[in-house]
Image (tube, rainbow, N blue to C red):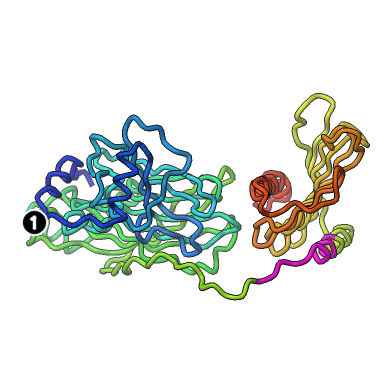
């Protein structure tokens, strides 16, 4: 609505200063110690983790003269309202959508609302002052992609509400506030009871402040791939601030979220219904699974049998072969990918980077049930990067998209130890490469 929020950061600090003093917990003290020692401290916002634990929202803080860290020092359980970070005249405070497993910042939450503050994400801070505070609603995994809704409410209305669209390597975060508020404004004006009251009291619809509360993902099982739309229900409450005798107007809207070719998300309101919708209590962050018997990874022999099976299937007539040229990295080279697709899903891919036969790199990627399972690479000539070696091979095997074995031949026939510092870095790079090289194949068959 057109009404301005009255809770600036300065006013918020003033109100907090009038609260009874609270004992600072050890985690919050540790947070402040890191902050004042010149580091960047962070804590996970309560209720912000996705159901599978892959994504979350971090509150981070650092001195204004300190450069942002690639990954801050994480302090579990710190309460923002009990740390020194509340003084935003001294510290830079931010909310980041992150991958906890990869310790990677994916996208910064920013708002054009001048009253937006990263400290609104702290549930412990909203002791009757900040309305609903922060709420996160995440959709199902969609082939590694995630949709999510992040809602920041304050006492005088929605501070901002965002749509998150992440592929696991980065996140696009788009404000939905303007579009959703426009729908609610039209709904308010259409309420006959409100219009009758307006005729008696002269109340202007623009005086209503709107807050949102994401309620649920509608039929999440119907949205399993990045091309499927995701539908959510978002409740809302519209009230005239400081006017107790004027009734609130409540309802819910059904919003469909989609993704275009560039990965940018969009939102379409399918309908608005009257009536109070109770927002569920914030779900506790998912706990780690209880430790049990460790499943043994397949043996190298079993991985080898799997690759042979997939090679044989790739030659069968029911598989569709798609070849796509790629830009060469230098003159005289040729680069292309060749994919075998079944049921519109890529099962095996060959990437060739060649200066001609006998001087090239050929990499085969194998998937099972949509997960990268194994990678085999043959390098010849100068591509071996090993003096006096004409041919070298490397074999990488994955379980749950984590590298579990890496066999190298050429200069030696010894397996690389998983404790080797380069081990998991190599696995992450192969996962990124597999996604990069798969994209032109999916685009060629119109499956993405």
Report the front residue among 210 and 203: 210
Assess whether residue 29 is covered by the magenta stretch. Answer: no
**Residue reaching furthest to the top:** 331
Report the front residue among 10 and 167: 10
From the viewer's perspective, tell me whether residue 423 is left or right of residue 37: right
From the viewer's perspective, tell me whether residue 350 is left or right of residue 429: right
Q: Which residue is mark 1?
A: 243
Report the front residue among 265 and 39: 39
* Residue under the image location 52 percent in, 58 percent down: 229
From the viewer's perspective, tell me whether residue 145 is left or right of residue 60: right
Tell me the crowding category of disc 1: few under 14, some 14 to 19, or many 20 or more residues within 10 angstroms, Cα based.
few
In the rendered image, residue 60, in percent from the top left (x then y), is placed at 36, 45
Q: Count of labels shown? A: 1
* Residue under the image location 49 percent in, 48 percent down: 265
Q: Is residue 68 above or below residue 313?
A: above
**Numbered range of the magenta stretch:** 295-307
State whether the magenta stretch is mostly helix, strand or loop. helix
Assess whether residue 299 is covered by the magenta stretch. Answer: yes
**Residue reaching furthest to the bottom:** 293
From the viewer's perspective, tell me whether residue 324 is left or right of residue 360: left
In the rendered image, residue 194, in percent from the top left (x then y), is placed at 16, 60
Quadrant hosting residue 129: bottom left
Quadrant hosting residue 379: top right
Q: Is residue 217 visible?
A: yes
* Residue under the image location 16 percent in, 44 percent down: 13
Tag 1, which secondary structure?
Answer: loop
In the rendered image, residue 58, in percent from the top left (x then y), is placed at 39, 50
Q: Is residue 187 visible?
A: no
In the rendered image, residue 144, in percent from the top left (x then y), is placed at 58, 56
Q: Is residue 80 above or below residue 299?
A: above
């Amino acid at each position: 609505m057109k009404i301005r929020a009255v809770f600036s950061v300065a006013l918020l600090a003033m109100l907090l200063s009038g609260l009874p003093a609270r004992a600072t917990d050890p985690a919050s003290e540790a947070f402040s110690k890191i902050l004042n020692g010149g580091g960047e401290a962070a804590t996970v916002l309560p209720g912000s983790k996705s159901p599978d634990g892959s994504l979350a929202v971090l509150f981070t803080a650092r001195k204004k003269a300190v450069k942002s860290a690639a990954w801050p020092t994480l302090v579990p359980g710190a309460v923002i309202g009990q740390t020194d970070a509340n003084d935003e005249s001294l510290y830079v405070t931010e909310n980041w959508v992150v991958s906890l497993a990869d310790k990677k910042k994916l996208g910064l939450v920013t708002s054009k609302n001048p009253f937006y503050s990263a400290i609104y994400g702290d549930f412990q801070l909203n002791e009757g002052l900040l309305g609903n505070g922060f709420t996160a609603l995440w959709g199902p995994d969609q082939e590694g992609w995630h949709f999510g809704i992040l809602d920041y409410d304050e006492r005088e209305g929605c501070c901002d509400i965002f749509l998150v669209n992440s592929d696991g390597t980065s996140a696009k975060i788009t404000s939905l506030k303007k579009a959703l508020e426009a729908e609610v404004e039209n709904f308010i004006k259409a309420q006959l009871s409100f219009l009758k009251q307006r005729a008696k009291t002269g109340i202007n619809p623009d005086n209503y402040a709107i807050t949102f509360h994401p309620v649920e993902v509608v039929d999440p099982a119907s949205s399993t791939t990045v091309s499927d739309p995701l539908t959510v229900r978002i409740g809302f409450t519209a009230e005239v601030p400081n006017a107790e005798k004027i009734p609130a107007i409540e309802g819910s809207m059904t919003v469909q979220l989609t993704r275009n070719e560039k990965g940018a998300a969009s939102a379409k309101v399918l309908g608005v219904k009257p009536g109070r919708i109770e927002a569920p209590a914030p779900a506790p962050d998912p706990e780690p699974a209880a430790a049990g018997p460790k499943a043994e990874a397949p043996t190298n022999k079993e991985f080898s049998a799997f690759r042979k099976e997939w090679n044989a299937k790739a030659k069968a007539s029911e598989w569709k072969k798609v070849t796509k040229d790629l830009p060469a990295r230098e003159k005289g080279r040729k680069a292309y990918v060749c994919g075998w697709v079944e049921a519109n899903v890529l099962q095996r891919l060959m990437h060739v980077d060649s200066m001609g036969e006998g001087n090239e790199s050929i990499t085969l990627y194998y998937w099972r049930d949509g997960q990268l399972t194994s990678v085999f690479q043959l390098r010849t000539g100068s591509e071996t990067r090993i003096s006096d070696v004409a041919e070298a091979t490397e074999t990488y095997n994955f379980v749950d998209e984590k590298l579990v074995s890496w066999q190298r031949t050429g200069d030696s026939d010894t397996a690389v130890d998983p404790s080797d510092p380069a081990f998991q870095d190599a696995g992450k790079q192969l996962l990124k490469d597999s996604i990069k090289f798969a994209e032109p194949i999916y685009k060629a068959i119109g499956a993405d």
